């Protein structure tokens, strides 16, 4: 099956708000039919409706990334409402905090289960479906924390995001011969409402001063990068991590 024959249907997890909603909206703007999924089903439905008030090109779905069966249900319902998915953006997760010597093992395990396990389940369920089609694009949202060990986030979050980078390579190698690419995007501090609401103003100024480009980073550019990596022409790129960090981690 040729890439051009593929229905332009994308699934974006964690799209009920924040970065996920921004990414999903960029796919809508690019002409995709998009499933917005989130553990908060009401938020997913609202975000999907806001992106397309007519309701013809979006759907909002409840989704718990901790359960493989939930990914299978999202795949089934997306097929029924929008058509066969050809793109998955594994965005859902939660930024976690805590000092390495103070986090107990249960919290560490739960953090990795959410932020790494969810990506694994998405790659597995959708990767199998894409491989059967002979075409697909998976984009995993990693983090600068997974590259530098996390200067603000917790050890469970940084460890999980580092694992996302390795998982991306594993699935890229596995799925590449079947027309499926798997890539990651690793953003640094983003210009999102949650950042402004949760970080004290003085601390936020310090963060911005420490970024070589002296600015919080664009969530829309993250979404636009995901759209680019989801294009048929992106067959040239797989197993890669695209850094969007304003120069915080030059390599």
Image (cartoon, rainbow, N blue to C red):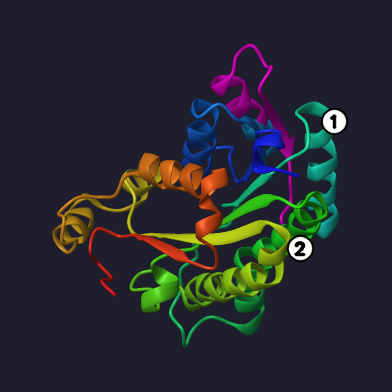
Mark-to-mark CA distance, 2 and 1: 20 Å
Left or right of 145 in this view: 124: right
226 relative to 99, above or below: above
Q: Position of residue 203 (x, y in %)?
A: 22, 58
Q: Position of residue 194 (x, y in %)?
A: 40, 45
Q: Is residue 147 visible?
A: yes
Q: Earlier in the sequence, mark 2 or mark 1?
A: 1
Quarter holding the N terminus is: top right
Residue 99, disc: none
Magenta range is: 45-66
On whether residue 62 falls in the magenta region, the answer is: yes
Q: Position of residue 116 (x, y in %)?
A: 62, 68
Left or right of 181 in this view: 132: right
168 relative to 217, above or below: below
Q: Quadrant of residue 140?
A: bottom right
According to the image, label 1 marks what residue? 80
Q: Residue at x 81, y 35 (%)?
A: 79
According to the image, label 2 marks what residue? 124
91 relative to 50, above or below: below
On whether residue 179 falls in the magenta region, the answer is: no
Give the class, few, some or many, for how many residues have Cα within 10 Å of label 2's Cα (few <14, many ≥20): some
Of the pair 12 and 42, the residue shown nearer to us: 12
Q: Residue furthest front?
A: 2
Q: Position of residue 165 (x, y in %)?
A: 52, 71
């Amino acid at each position: 099956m040729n890439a051009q024959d593929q229905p332009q249907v994308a699934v974006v997890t964690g799209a009920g708000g924040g970065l996920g909603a921004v990414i999903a909206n960029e796919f809508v703007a690019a002409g995709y039919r998009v499933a917005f999924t989130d553990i908060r089903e009401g938020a997913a439905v609202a975000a999907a409706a806001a992106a397309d008030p007519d309701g013809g090109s979006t759907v909002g779905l409840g989704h718990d990334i901790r359960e493989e069966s939930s990914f299978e249900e999202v795949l089934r319902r997306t097929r029924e409402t929008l058509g066969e998915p050809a793109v998955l953006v594994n965005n859902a997760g939660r930024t976690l905090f805590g000092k390495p010597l103070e986090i107990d093992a249960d919290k560490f395990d739960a953090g990795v289960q959410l932020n790494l396990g969810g990506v694994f389940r998405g790659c597995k369920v959708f990767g199998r479906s894409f491989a059967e089609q002979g075409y697909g694009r998976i984009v995993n949202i990693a983090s600068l924390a997974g590259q530098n060990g996390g200067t603000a986030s917790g050890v469970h979050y940084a460890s999980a995001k580092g694992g996302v980078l390795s998982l991306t390579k594993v699935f890229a190698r596995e799925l590449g011969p079947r027309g499926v690419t798997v890539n990651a995007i690793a953003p640094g501090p983003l210009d999102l409402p949650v950042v402004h609401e949760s970080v004290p103003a003085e601390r936020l100024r310090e963060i911005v001063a420490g970024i070589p480009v002296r600015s919080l980073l664009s969530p829309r550019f993250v979404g636009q990068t995901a759209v680019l990596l989801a294009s048929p022409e992106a067959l040239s790129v797989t197993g890669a991590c695209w850094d969007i960090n304003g120069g915080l981690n030059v390599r």
